[in-house]
Image: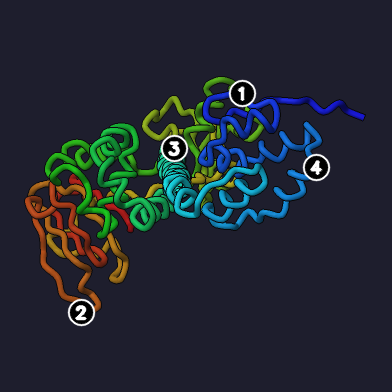
Amino acid sequence: MAKTIKFNLIIDKQPIRNLEDLQNSFNIEDLLTVFHNGSLKRWLEARELKDELEKLEKITKDSDDEKVASELCKIFKKDFTKEQIAFVAYPFEIRKKEEERLRTYNELAKKKNDIIFDYHTEYENLLKEIENKSSDYPLVKTSIQQIYKNYRGLFMLDAIAFYERFASEHKLVILAILANENMRPLLPYDLSKIYNDVGKNATSLVSSGKYDVASFMEKWKIDNNQPEVKLCKNVNAMSGLKQEEFLVVSCDQNKDIVGKVLILKNAVSWAPFHYVMASDLKINSNISPVKVCAKNTGGMFDYPEPANKKCLIIKMEEGNIVGNNRAAGTEGTDLDANGVNGKFPILDGIMYKSTNANHKLVYMEI
């Protein structure tokens, strides 16, 4: 059986070894403290003061402190008037309530700090995911909607840092905000600056196409013995390529076609060349929503995008006109370059008029 370790109570700043010491240094406020923290009970148990312990255990914890103080006086044979007990017990009760209030406040403050910390952490984790997958437009678009719904206030505080984080290397993220009519007004800079930072070079975001050409060309550069690659030796061998997409991986006669996916309608004069069928190429996992329309429309409107397809107009060169696709009778205003560049209008479909095939209209499907 484990030996019971005796210890002294501290009452009225004095070590209490026995009942006599307790009576000599009797202090109601200190006794209330050791009663509530349980050390008085343990002290009686250690000294095997069974009568006092039995009486102490009859005092219920939910009794008010004035009643507890009165019972303690009876147990330890100290005479105090009811008024004296009430006078001493009252400040203890007040202090206990204040301690409880402070404890509750501190718990709430900690809980609040934990909530704020978790909120900031979730926001930062979302930004990291956007950063790591900034070419995945569906993910970016959904994440921007999530920022507006759940983290709008934090974004407004973080707007400048957010912009600087994404504008240079992750332009699609800024364009996604411009395409979101709720988030757009929360950007920290005017549209002319955003155009200079993001819009002017937006053509770099245009996908190379449906197929992952870049990866295959890099693989071919490292090792010319790719099993998918075939050699077209002459014009006669081209008949099998007609109406089929293929990637030209090398051609001494026409280097401009290297790295391009083509469909042959007629025989050409630039054989021999190495090629790989498009069906053997990987599909681009992230097709950019940023597109380019470059054609001479003969001074008439062409319709690159149908009505009811929202488009963010990013950039257009002088002398051209763009507007809502009104083929279905919708209303809209035609815009020149001044109405586009640095304005980022959102149109319902696209009508485009140009007389220069080298001019580019850069836009993004929303």
- Closer to the eye: label 3 or 2: 3
Alpha carbon separation for disc pair 1 and 2: 96 Å
Name the residue that disc number 2 marks: 329
Look at mark 4 in the image and give the residue it sits on: 50
Q: How far is disc 1 from disc 4 in space, using C-alphas?
A: 21 Å
Residue marked by disc 1:
15
Q: Are marks 3 and 1 in contact (CB under 8 Å)?
A: no
Q: Residues within 10 Å of mark 4 (few under 14, many from 20)?
A: few
Q: Amino acid at mark 2?
A: Gly
* Residue under the point 51% across and 46% down: 285
Q: Is there a contact, CB below 8 Å, between mark 1 and mark 4?
A: no
Q: CA distance from mark 3 to mark 2?
A: 44 Å
Residue, disc 3: 128
294 to 34, vertically: above or below = below
Image location (x, y in percent) of residue 301: 17, 65
Residue type at mark 1?
Answer: Pro
Which residue occupies 9% across, 55% down? 339
* Element at label 2: loop
Give the mark toward the camera: 1 or 2. 1
What is the crowding at mark 1: few (fewer than 14 residues within 10 Å), some, or many (at least 20)? some
Q: How many marks?
A: 4
**Mark-to-mark CA distance, 3 and 4:** 66 Å
